[in-house]
Image: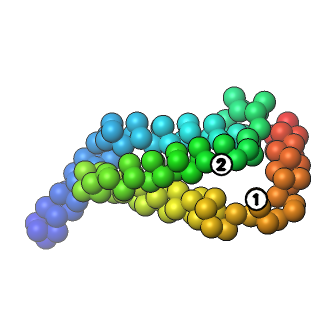
Amino acid sequence: MRVRWFLGLNLIAFALGMAVQATPAYDALVEAYFDNLFEANPTQATAAGFHQYDRKFERFTREARTERVRDLSRFLKQFQALDPATLTPAERNDRELVIANIQGSLLEEQSIRRWQRNPDFYPSAVTGSIFLLVKRN
């Protein structure tokens, strides 16, 4: 009985300790990543509830796509360079999700390239952005 009680207390203390520990370098990287993501995808920012981007629209130029790939590649390296052992369990899980999201975005931009093959890509981008603005009001 005492062993169970002792293990239970240690487990709670461990969980509480992990919950309150912050990883400032990780937090700063996440903040920079989402600032960059929403600046490049203001429609996505509006959908997420960040309405400071409501008056902006995606840039679809070749230069913007090149810049996006460069930014995504840089963030991918930074997230992969984080040592998971230094992160809380929630941060480790979020790190894996962000890495997978970046890899998916790079796959889309570099290989799939729907923006080059799908004739509905650009009209849908416009109508989808307008719909989000109308829907929120």
The vertical placement of 81 against 3, above or below, is above
Q: Amino acid at mark 1?
A: Trp
Q: Amino acid at mark 2?
A: Arg
Task: State the residue in front, 77 or 49.
Answer: 77
**Image-quadrant location for residue 15:** bottom left
Q: Could you tell me which quadrant the N terminus lies in?
A: bottom left
Task: State the residue in front, 20 or 60.
Answer: 60
Dot 1: element: helix
Circle 1/circle 2 CB separation < 8 Å: yes
Q: Identify the residue position indicated by label 2 in the image.
A: 65
Seen at 77% across and 38% down, the residue is 57
Dot 2: element: helix
Judged left or right of residue 122, residue 44 is left
**Which circle's residue, 1 or 2, is located before the other in the chain?**
2
Task: State the residue in front, 36 or 84.
Answer: 36
Q: Identify the residue position indicated by label 1 in the image.
A: 115
**Image-quadrant location for residue 112:** bottom right
Task: Report whether residue 61 is seen.
Answer: yes
Seen at 39% across and 52% down, the residue is 77
| CA neighbours of label 2 inside 10 A, class few (<14), some (14 to 19), many (20+) | some
Task: Report whether residue 44 is seen.
Answer: no
Residue 98, x across and y down, in percent: 49, 55
Residue 24, x across and y down, in percent: 33, 36
| CA neighbours of label 1 inside 10 A, class few (<14), some (14 to 19), many (20+) | few
**Image-quadrant location for residue 11:** bottom left
Task: State the residue in front, 41 or 96.
Answer: 41
Residue extending farthest left: 2
Seen at 61% across and 48% down, the residue is 66
Q: How many marks?
A: 2
